[in-house]
Amino acid sequence: LKLDEVIKIVAGETQVFYVEKCYAFVSRNIEVGLGCLNLESQTKEFRFPDIKPEVMELVIQYMHYKFKYQQLLDKEMIQLSELPEFKVPSELALDVLVAASYLQC
């Protein structure tokens, strides 16, 4: 894995996640941010101080889930009805929904 294929996501004030670009690009917000001439595109670092680390962790898990199963759906290897459920703890559901919506996942 090459360094330029990884982006850094900082959630809250200090929690750091390293995510491969192919998964991070599930987020339209991050994909567009990397394509602009801005600080994020140069440093490949995105800061989300208003997203709790445990919420961002679930959103990143969802990025992996969506990437994997979208590939299988696109290749018609599985049907929509065969997708496994992506489970989110009920106490975090609203926060995850808001964060995923903001990130445009």
Image (cartoon, grey):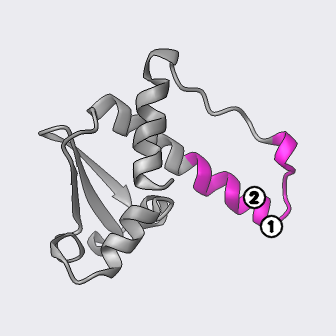
Left or right of residue 82, residue 19 in this image: left
Q: Residue at x 84, y 41 (%)?
A: 82
Figure check: 29 above or below 62 = below
Q: What percent of the width, then of the height, locates residue 40?
A: 21, 69
Q: Residue at x 47, y 55 (%)?
A: 104
Q: What percent of the width, then of the height, locates residue 13?
A: 12, 39
Q: Amino acid at mark 2?
A: Leu
Q: In this view of the protein, can residue 60 be seen by the observer?
A: no
Q: Decide: few, some or many residues near mark 1? Use Cα within 10 Å; few <14, some 14-19, many ≥20.
A: few
Which stretch is magenta? Answer: 65-82
| SS for callout 2 | helix
Q: What percent of the width, then of the height, locates residue 86?
A: 63, 33
Q: Amino acid at mark 1?
A: Lys
Residue at the far top in the pictured view: 91
Q: What percent of the width, then of the height, locates residue 76?
A: 85, 62
97 in magenta: no
Q: Which residue is mark 1?
A: 75
Figure check: 50 above or below 23 = above
Q: Where's the N terminus, which quadrant?
A: bottom left
77 in magenta: yes
Q: Which mark is residue 72?
A: 2
Left or right of residue 14, residue 18 in this image: right
